[in-house]
Image: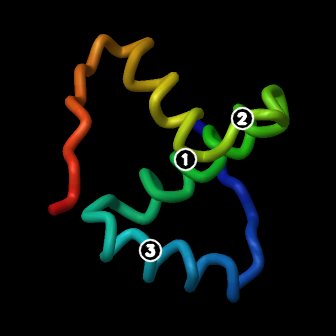
Amino acid sequence: MGIVKIDEELHEEVRRASTVMCRSINAQAEFWMKVGMLAEANPTLSFNEIVRMQFAAAQVHIRDLAVA
């Protein structure tokens, strides 16, 4: 484990997002880093496609829900 220095403004955005997503600040930053890394490695995929790909890799089955 290491320390990553980030801009104060970005840290505040991570803090705000973490409360909405019910994650710790570190978990939110880690999530954004992982998604960003996957997006750079797969530039043709959307955010939703990346998340679906990660669910499939973890064998998480989310059924499609239609909005009425």
Residue 2, visible in the rendered structure: no
Relative depth, front residue between 39 and 32: 39
25 w.r.t. 56: above or below? below
Q: Which mark is residue 30?
A: 1
Q: Residue at x 32, y 75 (%)?
A: 20
Q: Which mark is residue 17?
A: 3
Q: Find residue 47 and report its horizontal and vertical position in percent.
A: 60, 46
**Residue at numbered disc 2:** 45
* Numbered disc 2: secondary structure: loop
* Sequence-wise first label, 3 or 2: 3
* Numbered disc 3: secondary structure: helix
Q: Find residue 63 and report its horizontal and vertical position in percent.
A: 20, 30
Q: Type of residue at label 1?
A: Glu
Q: Type of residue at label 3?
A: Ala
Q: Kindly indicate the quadrant of the structure image that contains residue 11.
A: bottom right
The quadrant the C terminus occupies is bottom left
